[in-house]
Image: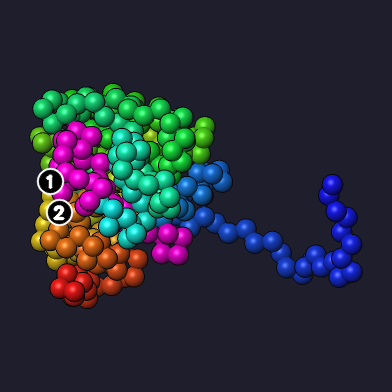
Amino acid sequence: MAEADYSKKEKNYHTGIPQKSEAFFLKGSNAYDWGMKNRLARIFNPKSGKTVMLAFDHGYFQGPTTGLERVDVTIRPLIPYADALMLTRGILRSVIEPSVTNSVVMRASGGPSVLKELSNEHIAVDMEDALRMNVSAVAVQVFIGGEFETQTVNNMTRLVDMGMRYGMPVLGVTAVGKELTRDARYISLASRILAELGASIVKTYFVPDFEQVTAACPVPIVIAGGKKLPEREALQMARDAIDQGASGVDMGRNIFQSDAPVAMIGAVRKVVHEKVGVKEAYEYYLDMKNK
Ligand code: 5RP
């Protein structure tokens, strides 16, 4: 039985204090419902407004990628340093302990392997399973200009419709086919199309004149790391991307293929969350590597 309120203390309604109603911190995300915003706030740190996503979903089309042959061995030590883990549901269920508290961005498209036409993807995860695994967003590859452009756009818009029903953000990845030039013109076109069609987050590649890409995209952009670069160059790319309006990184090979992955993800965090310059971040990387 509920107890009556017998407190002798006088009630205080704080009538002089208006209830605060603050805008949501993340670009373009103010109109979402509570659940969607809460999921986004688990991916993007509300204090810095940024995220360090660790991408290790490469196996969904290229099998045991270098550095990911044993995710349990190589990725586990990095988990405490990532805000979000980008992975497949197979790896989530088979390797990642359910006690991890990082947010999860789950790969939700797939189909062809590296042996086939990569743009021929379909939706590869049911929204119900994504909810069952308590993920914070689902990720879908969209091949603007690719052979199966319309099919992959359709994959994304169907996920956006399902995501809106349940408060699940969709991260759209601008996948660039071999025949397309990665420049600001193409990346702006692709990113803007994904945002216009409902992606809550866009993942794309860092290119010269990136501030034009972020300016024209009404939702947060995170950059993919791409092929492994020398650590200092990868940190410079992260610094430039953040300075030019990116809301974070979704980095894979430049972290897990580094000579010192824990040191590297720590240095990336400094760049993304602490506004640290490249020189200082690289020195941190070397210090940590040599410890
Ligand atoms: C595959 C992806 C990957 O998650 C992403 O590109 C991997 O990150 P990186 O390029 O930093 O290794 O979206 O298309």
Q: Residue at x 19, y 33 (%)?
A: 61
Q: Quadrant of residue 19?
A: bottom right
Is 3 rendered above or below residue 16?
A: above
In this view, the residue in front, 81 or 119, is: 81
Ligand 1 is located in which of the four quadrants?
Answer: top left
Is 112 rendered above or below residue 286?
A: above
Could you tell me if the residues under marks 2 and 1 are in contact, i.e. CB atoms within 8 Å?
Answer: yes
Q: Sort mark 1 into few (<14), some (14-19) or many (20+) by Cα contacts within 10 Å.
A: few
Between discs 2 and 1, the one toward the N terminus: 1
The residue that mark 2 highlights is: 257
**Amino acid type of the residue tagged 2 in the rendering:** Gln
Residue 183 appears in the picture as rendered? no
**Amino acid type of the residue tagged 1 in the rendering:** Thr
Q: Quadrant of residue 9?
A: bottom right
Q: Is residue 115 magenta?
A: no
Q: Residue at x 20, y 60 (%)?
A: 261
Which residues fall within the magenta stretch? 45-74
Residue 132: give x, y in percent of width and height.
47, 35
The residue that mark 1 highlights is: 66
Which quarter of the figure is the C terminus placed in? bottom left
In this view, the residue in front, 122 or 190, is: 122
Residue 270: give x, y in percent of width and height.
29, 68
Label 1: element kind: loop
Q: CA distance from mark 2 to mark 1?
A: 7 Å
Q: Quadrant of residue 153?
A: top left
Q: Is residue 73 magenta?
A: yes
Q: Sort mark 2 into few (<14), some (14-19) or many (20+) by Cα contacts within 10 Å.
A: some
Residue 194: give x, y in percent of width and height.
33, 38
Residue 108 appears left or right of 134: left
Residue 198 appears in the picture as rendered? yes
